[in-house]
Amino acid sequence: MAASAEEYAAFEERVRRTVYMDNLSPEVTENVLKAALDQFVNVVNVQFIPNYINPSLPRAALVEMETPNQASAIIAEMADSPFMVLGMPRPVRACAAEVEMFDSRPKKPGRKITYKWLDPEDPDFEVARKVKDLTGKHAAETEFLLNQHQLKEEENLANQQLETLKAHHKKYELIDGVLSDNTAKKLADRYRTRLSDA
């Protein structure tokens, strides 16, 4: 049964509010993901996507926010900051969700799909078999290229996030050092200000 235009419009709005996140650690649960993202946005729903082809790959999830602006903000934030899970940064990627990512998507109004079984003697049977073989070949090639590209992209993202993490850690160490060796107190005395005002 095809969805009404209003139902499909509501679904498209939900897609605009949703972010696709992948390369998630196997330890990530719905509560962990919500806790990590709630400091930036309001998470409405988390749906983990099972990987039927290769379950050993990291997990992926569709995370629904309250507004499309929040979804855009979290995509920008994930590009700049490491995603911390159990105290460890991880090069998690985030991008806007697409309609095809939802297994519970309604049928588009006005769209009709027809199919039929082909007899082996049917002239279209050979064409269908070739298309099936070609699809399998393309899937294998795509998986290989994605793995190559994904590994390189993950390495670049991990290096970028590690540099950011090191820079923040260095700043915190500097601040901690100034406070612990009384340099801040001496400067406050020298300039006749209270340390709490600085």
Image (tube, rainbow, N blue to C red):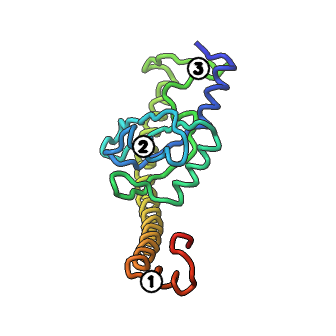
Please, what is the three-letter code of the amino acid marked with disc 2?
Leu
Q: Is residue 153 visible?
A: yes
Q: Give the x, y percent position of residue 60.
A: 42, 42
Q: Give the x, y percent position of residue 193.
A: 56, 78
Please, what is the three-letter code of the amino acid marked with disc 3?
Ile
Kindly identify which residue carries mark 3.
113
Kindly identify which residue carries mark 2.
33
Is residue 95 placed above or below 156 in the rendered structure? above
Judge the density around disc 3: few (<14), some (14-19), many (≥20) Cα neighbours within 10 Å: few
Q: Residue at x 41, y 74 (%)?
A: 176
Is residue 125 placed above or below 21 in the rendered structure? above
Image quarter of residue 91: bottom left
Whole-number angstrom distance, CA of label 3 to CA of label 1? 74 Å
Is residue 154 placed above or below 43 in the rendered structure? below
Is label 2 in contact with label 3 (beta carbons under 8 Å)? no
Kindly identify which residue carries mark 1.
183
Q: Give the x, y percent position of residue 157.
A: 46, 62
Q: Which one is in front, 18 or 136?
A: 18
Q: Earlier in the sequence, mark 3 or mark 1?
A: 3
Please, what is the three-letter code of the amino acid marked with disc 1?
Thr
Q: Give the x, y percent position of residue 160.
A: 47, 67
